[in-house]
Amino acid sequence: MSALLLLLEAYVRLLLHDLFMRGHSFVALYQRVKQFPCAPTSTADSSPEAVCHALDLACALYGKQVLCLQRSAVLLQMLRQRGLPAQMMIGAQKMPFKAHAWVEVHGQVVNDRLASRENFLVLEVC
């Protein structure tokens, strides 16, 4: 049952993110993400892997494509709510130019196999 609730939470957070972005810019999202509080103590009833899995399923069921920035912002909020010290990384590579966002917990990438500090120059840590 908790996996279903986690999936529902992830789906609702994707919807809320889309609603927020309809009236706000990237700068507003950046400021919002920087202010997501981390619960003072870990109430992690779910592992980072379980949260990532639920978000992956929610993205598959979502009515439109979910890009890395949206996925990372939602995951960051879900993990921090559970007391996990998650950080959203925003990086870029020069050739070919690509920008990317991903989430790390304790320096380990949790939501993306391709993202790493070796592949992308980290421009910002949120």
Image: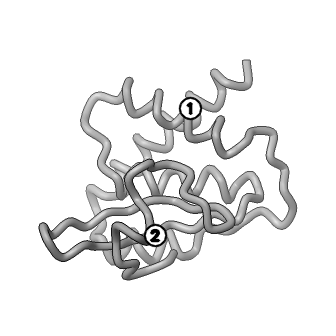
What residue appears at the point 66 percent right and 46 percent down from the top-left corner?
Answer: 48
What residue appears at the point 74 percent right and 52 percent down from the top-left corner?
Answer: 82
The disc labelled 1 sits on which kind of residue? Ala
Q: Quadrant of residue 3?
A: top right
Label at residue 3: none
Which residue appears farthest toward the left when viewing the image?
96
What residue appears at the point 56 percent right and 40 percent down from the top-left corner?
Answer: 52
Secondary element type, mark 1 = helix
Can you say whether 17 is above or below 89 in the image? above
- Residue of label 1: 54
The spot of residue 68 in percent (x, y) is 34, 53
Neighbour tally class for label 1: few under 14, some 14-19, many 20 plus, Cα within 10 Å? many
- Residue of label 2: 89
The spot of residue 30 in percent (x, y) is 41, 74
Can you say whether 27 is above or below 111 in the image? below
Please state, as top left, top right, bottom left or bottom right, where the N terminus lies in the image: top right
Can you say whether 59 is above or below 4 in the image? below
